[in-house]
Image: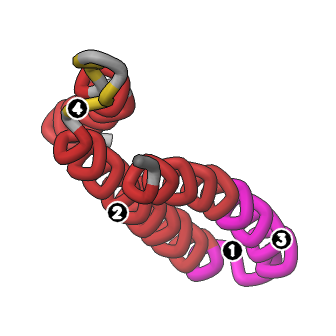
Amino acid sequence: MSKKAAKVALAMFVVGLALMFVPTLAAQEAGGVTTGLGLQKLGGAIGAGLAAIGAGMGIGRIGAGAVESIARQPEATGQIQTAMIISAALIEGAALFGVVVGMLAVTAG
């Protein structure tokens, strides 16, 4: 991974981590009424979007690496495809969790 890509990935991670706490920080009670629901919904929507974008980027990199590996060693196609499918499934699971949590933050309130 290049230095520029590593910096972009780190920045996206930090922004995503910060957005996870926006709903908590935005929920201020004023006389028993929770305010700041606009920020909560915005944070949830952006967090869900970032989870989907991150999953797409991750699976794209897995696919590119698998195709390159198969081109270099065609005899290992079965093992490469198996590892690619397992990795993609794990990424999709984490992304689905992030999207669900983001959507729950959007619909809360």
Is disc 2 surrounded by few (<14), some (14 to 19) or many (20+) residues within 10 Å? few
Q: Which residue is mark 1?
A: 73
- Residue 36 lies, with reference to residue 60, above or below; the image says above
Foreground of the two, 95 or 3: 95
- As helix, strand or loop, the secondary structure at mark 4 comes to strand
Q: CA distance from mark 1 to mark 3?
A: 15 Å
If you read the primary sequence from the N terminus, does the residue marked by circle 4 or circle 2 appear first? 4
The span from disc 4 to disc 2 (Cα, nearest Å) is: 29 Å
Inspect the magenta stretch and tell me whether residue 84 lies in it.
yes
Residue at point 51%, 53% (across, down): 104
Residue underneath mark 4: 35
**Residue 66 image position (x, y, % from top left):** 59, 71
* Residue 11 on the magenta segment: no
Q: Which residue is mark 2?
A: 53
Question: 10 Å neighbourhood of mark 4: few (<14), some, or many (≥20)?
Answer: some
Q: Earlier in the sequence, mark 2 or mark 3?
A: 2
Q: Is residue 89 left or right of residue 11?
A: right
Q: Give the left or right position of residue 89, taking residue 95 as reference.
A: right
Image location (x, y in percent) of residue 54: 39, 56
The answer to whether 74 is drawn above or below residue 46 in the figure is below
